[in-house]
Amino acid sequence: MARCMIAAAICAAALCLGAAAAQADWRETPAIRALYDKAKAEGEVVIWGPVQTEVDWIQGELAKRFPGITVKATGDLQAATKLIAEARANRHSVDLWQNSLGGMLEVQKRGLFAKVDWPSYGLDAGRLLFDGEGLAVHNFVYTTAYAKSFVTPAELPRTWNDLLDPKWKGRMVSEDFLFPRLMGFLALEWGEERTEKWGRAMLDAQKLLVVNSPRESFLKTGERVLAVGDSVNQTFQYSDNGVPTGYTVLDLVPAVQFTVAVMKDAPHPNAARLLAAWLATDEGLAVREKLVHGFSIRPGSTSALADDIRRAGAKVILEDLSTMAQRAAYYKKFSALARGQ
Amino acid sequence: MSGAALSRLPRPRFGGAERSARGDIGLAGRSVMALAVAAAFALILAPLGMLLTAAFRGPQDLLPFEDGAHWTLDNLAAVYLDANLYRAVIPNTLVFTAGSVALTFAVAFTLAWLVERTDLPLRDAVYTIVLFPLLVPGIVFSITWIFLLAPNTGWINVALRAVLGRGGEGPLDVFSMGGMILVQGLGLVPFVFLLLTAALRAMNPSFEEASSVSGASPLKTFLRVTLPVLRPGLLAPLILATLVTLEQFEIPLVIGVPARINVFSTRIFFELNPDTDLPAYGRAAAVALPFLAAGILLLIAYNALIRRADRFVTVTGKGFRPARFDLGRWRAPALVFVALYATFAALLPAVVLLWASLFGYANPGLAALSAASVAGYRGLLANAAFWLAIRNTFVVAAGSALVVTAIALVLAWIIQRSRMRGRAIVDLVSFLSLGVPTVIAGLAWMLLFLSAPIGIYGTVAALLLAYCYRMAVATRLTRAALIQIHVELEEASAVAGGAWLTTLRRVVLPLLRPSLVASFVLLFIVGFREFTLPMILHSPDNVVLSVMMWKAFQSGRTMEAAAIGTIIVLLAVPVIFAVRNVVLRRDNQG
């Protein structure tokens, strides 16, 4: 056993060293060096994301690797409207935008993203989205978070159906935006009828409290002990805020795909390409995972969460464009259910 | 004694003529009026126009201004052919609004009367404490009440179960219509209190004294004298509180959504945060149209009820010093009432805010004290953006409050005193600003600034202008106060040779000071905590504290968000206190 562990540790170290070397190599490739020179001349890059935390960490990390480029990062949930309005007025203040795949659709449909030959910058074709207009970065992974102060690991549910156990009645909370989306993903696997039945049972029989406020306070006080449909990275955030929270890997693992795209009329196009490319590299993904727990669980991912999921034998339901319309129809319907409309 | 008997003086009005009993308006006066009207129209009609346009533009997957968008009734059909609107949303909204406004008025009037008309001790401190909830972000106020009344672990419920010797959950549940009314009702008290104190302060108590001398009981005096005389001063806050409650969405979202109780404002929120696609501005605007209709109806009712404005005149050429009722044996109950309000509406939210800024979500207790951290504050103080945000917040909040109060003064005078053609339209337009949801106003300003050739987009000036669209409160408040002031005072100034501007500056302005200060303070506080407009219009250069707080909150940086909230309170309280003291000192000197 000890030998196995030593061997595993050696392998992991070798992989890390290999990855670090590979990243250093990536930065030294002629294409990236040339891009960096041009980006440095631009001196600045403006990135928007849905929330501030998801973009705040970038400045420090980019500066370590590509000094001389200032990152202006803004979190804005209504960025789509602004990007469309700015483009229409021919004013362009944003270089690249990071959001969920679905959240970017309306802007992409309007042709506001630049199409970039990402493989020429050494990026794997498997990370390309929107036919080269976007790059896959991390995932928003749905889970059932639990308050460590009130629930032991042995008590935890193993499947989404386990949440219908009477022992959880009156002890669960969810969010009005996330719960219908979670149901939308589950419906892809279960079908609409079964999912609706499950959702109604959660709301009516299990008295799931669907809120529009932070779930941390509910978990902290024990008002509720499970947060259904929160994301894995939120559990780390809750713990950082003084609410010891864990996550579960249930039988199905729905995951939203976060994407980064360079704007067609970016004021700093080279800096934008450089940053987007770096964010999508293994190193960019690893740094994000370490700093803000933004895990990638795409096929082939080596993140800690991807390993957990593989070990649990859970099935990942990854957001993709082919199921977008179906899911949208589902969660429109389930939203009305959750909100009592 | 009825209000009608109070004054039967003739009411000459300014006509198109240059001269009147109240002096020569003159070119300067006309210019000031024209400027105020033009500014008001420009500031209000942009958002109002966007609301009316967006409601009739579609399809939903296009923004109202985009190529391909066309005129349509689809938004109206989607909203008003939905059975749920009539089955749940409208009944819920009516119950919620009526309940909240009734509770607000009962508490706010009592507090205002105690502060302005009685010998209650510590009145200045009470004044500031009452305003406190207005400074606390709505979300914090709501979460405080969840801490108190959550069915399983709410402090009050835990205490009640211990007293009643029962287990399980409850007996109270904040996630209910009653909970919504309680939290909204208490949350709106400062707003109405501020408006009522101005009216009570301007009221000449000699009428009440005369009633008492004539042998009327205090209740009879209150019902037959105080209430009729205060009618404009009561109606204005009543109408404004009704419209604000209709538009307010923080408490219905935090308290109502878990109870699955939908009202108009949550419907607007959900349209703007749709399940798919872009925000449905068209549908949100369509949902907001009844706000406008309600605004128009309430304005008509208001104007009808105060048609004989001279019945409400209380300030005439005869000087008066407001006398105060001796509370006597009612002093202790009055203090208990104030203390209860202060505890639940001010102290507990303040403690929650401060606690969260130092301890995050740690449970209250001695054990947590060792874990206190000032990291939230330290991070802020070291952040250059924070200092920029403080400067911007003061500039925008104070600047917009000043501009709006000044414009409102002129508008109120035009509406109440002049015979200017179209003054009814000025009245209507200024009032309707309250019926425009902030997010729609933000969209209108964004489009305007983006297309303006003056490069104002993303600047502090853009925010300052955008905040100024909220004209209704200041205009209504100033007009209500103007009704209480007899025209003879202005006539006396005119007879003495004072031009209109001089009369306005030296006679009207000092007499309206309580109302104008109330208006300024209210707008200043609203500007200080406003986050919807700056979220839409923000850039790295015009960031304000509320946006920083909201972003920290959204990002899960609870301690930082709470630290900013605490700083907002700490910065705003001295301003309120100082302004109040300046007013009191001047009044006492007068």
Image: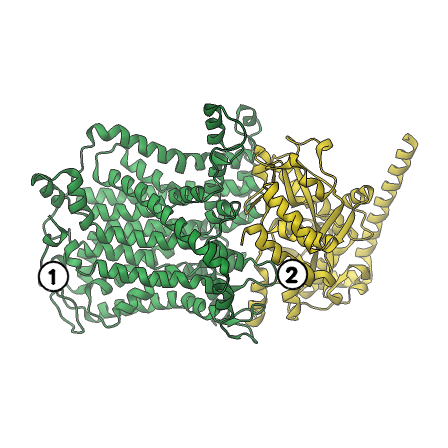
Taking the image as shown, residue A118 lies to the left or right of residue A104, namely right
Residue A309 visible here: yes
**What residue is pinned by disc 2?**
A329
Identify the coloring: by chain
The residue that label 1 is drawn on is: B491
Instruction: Give the secondary structure at mark 2.
Output: helix
Identify whether B560 is placed above or below B537.
Answer: above
Chain A, colour shown: yellow
Spot occupied by residue B310 in the image (x, y as percentages of width and height): 15, 58
Residue B72: mark in rendering: none
Letter of the green chain: B
Tell me the amino acid under the disc marked 2: Ala
Q: Amino acid at mark 1?
A: Glu
Crowd around label 2: few <14 · some 14–19 · many ≥20 (10 Å): few
Q: Position of residue B525 (x, y in %)?
A: 39, 48
Q: Residue B575, how many percent across, how many down?
A: 35, 44
Q: Secondary structure at mark 1?
A: helix
User: Viewer-nearest of labels 1 and 2?
Assistant: 2
